[in-house]
Image (cartoon, rainbow, N blue to C red):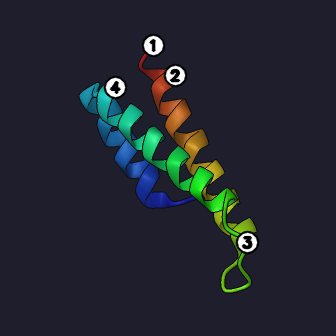
Amino acid sequence: MSEAVKLIVDGYVRLKDRVKIEELREHRQGLRNALKGKNSDAFDTGYLSRLLDSELEVIEAGLTSLQ
């Protein structure tokens, strides 16, 4: 998991900024969807997909903690 995303989400949670967390989630989901359309030997799509999935888990946990 990206430590940067964890810190960003933690900051938004402290600020109670649900909108920014939702925007971050939408951005990561868009990246994951774009990655699914790629099939390249130039980079490891499996690793990037797992990274985005772990970041989305952190983002979802942040949204859950705001409820």
Question: 60 left or right of 37?
Answer: left
Q: What element carries label 1?
A: loop
As measured in the structure, the alpha-carbon distance from the residue carrying label 3 to the one carrying label 4 is 34 Å
| Label 4: few (<14), some (14–19) or many (≥20) C-alpha neighbours in 10 Å | some
| Label 2: few (<14), some (14–19) or many (≥20) C-alpha neighbours in 10 Å | few
Q: Which residue is labeled 3 in the image?
A: 39
Q: Compared with residue 48, is residue 21 higher up or lower down, i.e. above or below?
A: above
Q: In which quarter of the image is residue 49?
A: bottom right
As measured in the structure, the alpha-carbon distance from the residue carrying label 2 to the one carrying label 3 is 33 Å
Residue at (61, 40) in percent of width and height: 57
Which is more foreground, mark 3 or mark 4? Answer: 3
As measured in the structure, the alpha-carbon distance from the residue carrying label 4 to the one carrying label 2 is 10 Å
As measured in the structure, the alpha-carbon distance from the residue carrying label 1 to the one carrying label 2 is 5 Å
Q: Which of marks 4 and 1 is nearer the N terminus?
A: 4
Q: Earlier in the sequence, mark 4 or mark 2?
A: 4
As measured in the structure, the alpha-carbon distance from the residue carrying label 3 to the one carrying label 1 is 38 Å
Q: Which residue is labeled 4 in the image?
A: 18
Q: Compared with residue 24, is residue 60 higher up or lower down, i.e. above or below?
A: above
Residue at (54, 45) in percent of width and height: 29
Q: Quadrant of residue 1?
A: bottom right
Give the residue type at disc 4: Arg
Q: What element carries label 3?
A: loop
Q: In which quarter of the image is residue 40?
A: bottom right
Return the mark for residue 67. 1
Q: Compared with residue 49, is residue 28 higher up or lower down, i.e. above or below?
A: above
